[in-house]
Amino acid sequence: MIRVVLPAHLRTLARVDGELKLEVAGPVTPRSILDALEARYPMLRGTIRDQVTQERRAFVRFFACEQDLSQDSPDDPLPEAVAAGVEPFLIIGAMAGG
Amino acid sequence: MSRVRVLVGTRKGAFVLTADGKRQSWDVSGPHFGGWEIYHLKGSPADPNRIYASQSSSWFGQVIQRSSDGGKTWEAVGNKFAYEGAVGNHLWYDGTQRPFEFARVWHLEPSLSDPDTVYAGIQDAAMFRTTDGGQTWLELTGLRTHPSAAQWQPGAGGMCLHTILLDPKHPGRIYIAISAAGVFRSDDDGGTWRPINRGLVSEQIPNPTAEVGHCVHRIAMHPSRPNVLFMQKHWDVMRSDDAGESWKDVGGNLPTDFGFPIDVHAHEPDTIYVVPIKSDSEHYLPEGKLRVYRSRSGGHQWEALTKGLPQSHCYVNVLRDAMAVDALEPCGVYFGTTGGQVYASADAGDSWTPIVRDLPSVVSVEVQTLP
């Protein structure tokens, strides 16, 4: 199971508490995690990546294992610790609040 | 006894204010969707318990919420607003061309007869419609692909389609307004559109009387007389008596004719309300006084309504979608300010009391009159 942490506003929107655990088919990448996330929580479609272009929204970042993975390809494999469920995949609202 | 439900959209959430027909004692619920910008909420005339809300943020984009119990509970519905076909360009602030890009939904206008049909006005300006209660949204492409679209330009708030008026007497007739393009009318339920801006004069565009490019802030009609339209333009308060074919200035003795909202009394089609703002570069009240101006003659002659409103050191604004009227007798008038106050008048504007004083900055106010 893949561990995913959503920002507070998206937890509220998806009506979940705390960390999520997702079954992800195939290679564990940002794209495969978001595909699984949006399939289980359709209300999150469009809030993390654009529904048409599939590009990450500008004020959303992806962190894992103390690394910023936001600029990596959505098809790059995530660190083994994320794929093994040891470390979470963090979806972060950019620090733009002042 | 009748009740009223006031739907308030703010920069940090939605609030639902309810009262009985006396409109003296209010229940306040919210914030709903706390922390998100709520540009607009509106209930269905066909089913008042069905309410739609536009929820958005710079971080997480656009969400549409739907309630089927009068705003007590909500569910997120479809939020995919994809332009159909070639996107095309519009004017940018510096006069260059720029592609249309979706930013947010400014206005939701439920159908007069079907709770599942809703029109959405978006930024960058285009018109969408759902017929399945918000699950899917399809663009009415005839507007954005109008030959004049390359001459549309954004106002200070972005290039928004902010007003949608459904004509109750002429099925299929819709009026919309875009800042800064002007007013457009469709007579075939949104299939085709034409600009109706003759008589508008705007010094901010190269040709002040051009067919498009005018910064129309808001239009309003009385449902019994839909061929008569009232407009608050960037500067100028205007009136049309021929379904928008021509417009005349009715600003008369207003202290300033810049402003955002305009609305019509529920029972007196020639009684209209505006809130004059000092100027387009200041965006606050003149002389620090919060004054609603009322005309009982459809324009030209205006009176200041001040009883119960602050008359010193008040520098708020009242945004374009932040005024509404109820259908009770006497007519109730409501407006919200950028300072977070929502004021109500239960006597057609003669006197005012704040329902709430310290909400986040108010973006929109709608009111439902309930049995």
Image (cartoon, coloured by chain):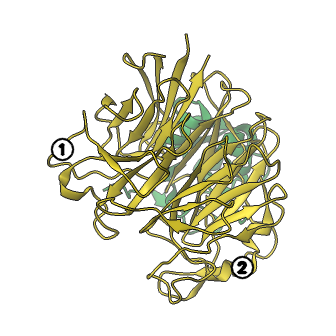
Chain under numbered label 1: B
Residue at 73 percent across and 55 percent down: it is B174
**Which residue is located at x 52 percent, y 88 percent?**
B95
Residue B187 is left or right of residue B219, and the answer is: right
The residue lying furthest to the top in this view is B1
Q: What chain is tagged by disc 2?
A: B
Instruction: Look at the numbered disc 1 and give the secondary structure of its residue.
Output: loop
B252 lies left or right of A35: left
Q: Colour of chain B?
A: yellow
Residue B214 position, x and y percent, is: 54, 74
Image coordinates for residue B183, horizontal then vertical, percent: 63, 66
Question: Against B228, is B248 above or below?
Answer: below
Q: Name the residue under label 2.
A: B88
Residue type indicated by callout 1: Gln
Quarter of the image with the C terminus of chain B in it: top right
- In percent of width and height, residue B110 lies at 70, 41
Specify whether A33 is left or right of A86.
Answer: right
Count neighbours of disc 1 (C-alpha within 10 A) and say few if under 14, some if 14 to 19, many if 20 or more. few
Q: Which chain is green?
A: A
Other residues around mark 2 within 10 Å, as few (<14) / some (14–19) / many (≥20)? some
Distance from Cα at disc 1 to Cα at disc 2: 47 Å
Q: In which quarter of the image is residue B48?
A: top right
Q: Which amino acid does label 2 sit on?
A: Gly
View extreme (left): residue: B312
Say which residue label 1 marks. Answer: B311
Position in image of residue B44 (x %, y %): 68, 33
Residue B92 or B256: which is nearer the viewer?
B256
Report the label total.
Answer: 2
